[in-house]
Amino acid sequence: MTNATGPTVPTDQAIAAVRPLPAGAAHLDRGGLLGGWQARNTAATLPHCIDQLDGHGNLDNLRRVTGDHDGGFAGYWFADTDVYKTLEAAWWDGGFAGFTADVAQLLEKAQDPDGYLVSYFQLEHRGRQWRELPSSHEMYSAGHLIQAGVAAARSAPRDPAAQQLLAVARRFADLLVHRFGPGGQDAIDGHPQVETALVELFRVTGHRPYLDLAARLVELRGHGLLGPESRFHTSYYYQDHVPVRAAAEVTGHAVRQVYLAAGAVDVAVETGDTELLAAAERLWESAVRAKTYLTGGQGSRHRDEAFGDPYELPPDRAYAETCAAIGSFHWAWRLLLATGKARYADEMERLLYNGIAAGAGLQGTAFFYSNPLQVRTGHDGSDEDAPGQRLAWYSCACCPPNLARLMASLHTYAATGGPDGLQLHLYTAGTFSAGGQRVRVETAYPWDGTVTVTVTEAAAGPWTLALRIPGWSTGARLTVEGAEVPVAAHDGYVSVTRTWRAGDRAELVLPMPARLVTAHPRVDAVRGTAAVTRGPLVHCLEHADLPAALDGVAFEDLRLDAGTPIDVVHNGHPIAPVALHARMLAPHDADGPLYRALDDAAPPATRGATVPMVPYYLWANREPGPMRVWLPLARQRR
Amino acid sequence: MTNATGPTVPTDQAIAAVRPLPAGAAHLDRGGLLGGWQARNTAATLPHCIDQLDGHGNLDNLRRVTGDHDGGFAGYWFADTDVYKTLEAAWWDGGFAGFTADVAQLLEKAQDPDGYLVSYFQLEHRGRQWRELPSSHEMYSAGHLIQAGVAAARSAPRDPAAQQLLAVARRFADLLVHRFGPGGQDAIDGHPQVETALVELFRVTGHRPYLDLAARLVELRGHGLLGPESRFHTSYYYQDHVPVRAAAEVTGHAVRQVYLAAGAVDVAVETGDTELLAAAERLWESAVRAKTYLTGGQGSRHRDEAFGDPYELPPDRAYAETCAAIGSFHWAWRLLLATGKARYADEMERLLYNGIAAGAGLQGTAFFYSNPLQVRTGHDGSDEDAPGQRLAWYSCACCPPNLARLMASLHTYAATGGPDGLQLHLYTAGTFSAGGQRVRVETAYPWDGTVTVTVTEAAAGPWTLALRIPGWSTGARLTVEGAEVPVAAHDGYVSVTRTWRAGDRAELVLPMPARLVTAHPRVDAVRGTAAVTRGPLVHCLEHADLPAALDGVAFEDLRLDAGTPIDVVHNGHPIAPVALHARMLAPHDADGPLYRALDDAAPPATRGATVPMVPYYLWANREPGPMRVWLPLARQRR
């Protein structure tokens, strides 16, 4: 059994191009952006989540099952999963011993003798137990419980509370195997999630029936088991319209789709099912080719929280749920481990710095559920799915604890390795080791593109240091011990194989100019616009940054002067040390009817000003106001 | 009491600039487009609706209440309203005596002694009666029953079945007055509709408490009576966030908003409440200024079936529910009657020929619920709210019978008049009379812009013939008895006052070139595109019309060559006698990544072909395929 850690640890028998680092092998400096986020998670987000679980009755729901609390059921029928995700986060974090011990005890006490544990159905709804699988989220709930158990087992295998939680998780998993395993009921959950959890539980325990059940659930999907279509949900919504291995494109509820795909990868690598792995890669390609926002966000529709048609990517109504971005990150990570292709690490990076990071506010205690790329003046933000500001919590609070568990495990995603060497995927200050070698990474990434890797321990003999050359970069340069090394990336990585000695340094320089980006012409929703990016960061224009020179101009009337270079300004600001300064023009007069003859000339620009653009993930941390990523061009291209 | 007819007949005391024609005073020739639609309604749509009510259990729900049927409740809790709308249509049509008599009897038998009549709650849900007003649609159901009763009373006042139905409607209305009138419960229905129905019932009966209740319901809205906001519905959804007379813009569920606004106009004109009337005009202006599609459709979001933010008008995800278009038509008609301003008739025309007409297929037996302005290749049409083809019926079947009742009463909207003269609003072949004068209108409108009006009966002395000069037209010319009359439109009408004699002819010529239309630059979703219109008709590009020269080109890659004039081709086709021929260009190579550098030049066009564009309302009558109204421009304007 491998001693690696993190939320995805394939067995030694699995298909794997690269492997997670061992426990204790990765540390992020809290002075780096990623390490800072992780520290904020410990200090703010996780305590906040624990408070909210108390305040919103999630823990009390379980206490009602044990007879330790009176009162009505609070929240959604899947409210337990907020507890499980917070619990998983706490185990990865390692610093919430009281909470993890208390909850393990509570769960053990609340669990039915047969292993069942979903408080909503254990309370007033016994008769509905297992009868409403399209919507009940029972296996989904089991899955999050299992993932918390896996986190406990990997983080603190000898901690009694971890063992207690793992045992609870196994009992529920055993019940699933009994009911739904080979020979049992042919059934699937409306919300995929348990598939990946079961594979992970197999990885931790070596108990094959968990893997077999996961494989079975993946296979059973796509045959209409979730029943006839209704006005509210079609089989596309559940990804039950076509088997995973035959699916041509991502569709339906985005979180369900990406969770399912991640589970399919887990099953594929552990069962050696290269056809299923290829299907998961094909699905991923379909998503990135035509159904993913510039921020990595996914889900073009509020209705059904769903992927749209190909190239349907409205910035204003982007759903881009934080959970979908996290699920997409998990999916890409699994594909990276299986294939070693940098495109998957590129996607993780894009997600992390944009679609995921935007989900949390500066203090780490307010969150977005959906992450639009545009908010208009006069936006009706009364809908909790489309507020103009982050909220402290949600009635459907899936996203905040999902962020907490990702951030608590963030160090496990930055690098992979083994006896043959180390592969660096996400650049941030920290130390990483595997197989006797250890490196220290120093960088101000993503504010600066210089990454210095110093070998601090070296195993005897040659080994390979592999550095990702991001897909967004051009002109990357690498020196090793001061000597230039040609950057000929293979599968997106430049590899240096040599007998490294402690103290050896490699320096990678990734130039980071501001870039103007446009979308495929089929993306109708952003035609005639450009976005501004730098390195992995997408920037945005916020109302709060408009200078006095543009007073009185409607935000929606501003146009980007693409002919004026965008300045990269290092301003030393502690939160956003780099701003991009773009010249925006304002029309003379933007009044006029909603529809008019094409030959009515657009009003000419008469005013202009330079406006700083902050990274997208930092939006909505000041006074409320409109925002946009895609800026209409003052001069549209022919 | 006035002897006028139609679905809106203000009393003689009401604020009114123009007045509906008397019963029997308007006839549409079935050879004209509008008359043809009306004939199709009689021959196909209405019988189809009646069949569907039987097939989908709507009538059986009522028969269960009377004990004449066994089985479970079918459909939505407001399923009775499909019966009422079909019934209203049958009364306006006048040709379904068996159905109208049977249903009147059924309803009388199903009605509770106290007047209550909502089969869903009368069956298994007595305990929930009147307890769930935000969602129960009980007053909404009463409203549609009342409107059917009003149609019966106006169409056939001496018919016993009409009297029976009116009596049933009055009993339910009396119950509403008792429960919710002055001194009763302060409460409103989540779905406005009963307001306009109650005013109409007052108009038919002269019973003032109906008007008082309607006024009260309009006033009570906007004070949060519908309760705390939920994840699913905010007070904006119900228009309960601000009183109608203080509302600055249309918002929330589009059908509810337009029904509410129509009711507010009815209350305002009957109570002389000019402030409320001004508020309704202001709301209407907010809709047309920034929240209405080129087709007249309204509702930019599938989520909540709602208006969007200002200028949020995505063509692909346009909800533009057929019922919202019909409600908007009703609202505009009321404002036209109150003010006499042609802008309201312009809007009725735009709705009728585009957003409404698209709701029904050629045969009149298949329908759209939502009316997008774009469908992509690869569209997932599995959701009944967004199919690529019309469906014979819907689980929420509000739209088809709504179309039936509008079409059955269509003749009543074309003209208004009285002793002082006639006002022609919608041009179509037919005869119209009022106050002793009668005219015959001959025209091939909207295929041709020549409208000939012949006086066939003339009252003694001078009277005024007023002809609408559509907002879309330029260069209109009018001759009376061969002599040119200067077209100096006042409030959108050109008026000719003279002592008309039988045989006198007026000829209005409205030039109808093809026009390229663009949207306000704030409409992000259609930037860099143009639409093609002619007269009141919006045209669209359909995949079925692509010539062989464009084989192999993805529909989404086609670009409009705006530099080549669009030909108006009179082809004699019985269904679409005029097509607009536009030159479309295809890029050499449309592959490429979803996001790319702005300076990567767009691929040049290497192929082109002339493609006919059919009127939008005719789309999806051939094989399924992509469609678009807004065409990306090959050369975007600077």
Image (spheres, coloured by chain):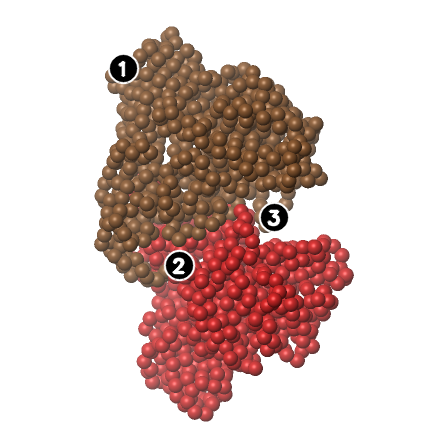
Chain colours: A brown, B red
Seen at 42% across and 58% down, the residue is B291
Mark 1 is on which residue type? Answer: Glu
User: In the visual, does B31 lie left or right of B82?
Assistant: left
Q: Find disc 2 in the rendering and name its residue.
A: B290
Q: Mark 2 belongs to which subunit?
A: B
Residue A235 figure quarter? top right
Distance in Å between CA atoms under marks 2 and 3: 34 Å
Mark 2 is on which residue type? Answer: Ala
Seen at 37% across and 48% down, the residue is A626
Between residues B361 and B99, which one lies in front from this camera angle?
B99
Mark 3 is on which residue type? Answer: Ser
Q: Find disc 1 in the rendering and name its residue.
A: A481
Which of disc 1 and disc 3 is earlier in sequence? Answer: 3
User: Is label 2 in contact with label 3 (beta carbons under 8 Å)?
Assistant: no
Q: Mark 3 belongs to which subunit?
A: A
Q: Position of residue B321 (x, y in %)?
A: 51, 58
Seen at 52% across and 80% down, the residue is B12
Q: Find disc 3 in the rendering and name its residue.
A: A230
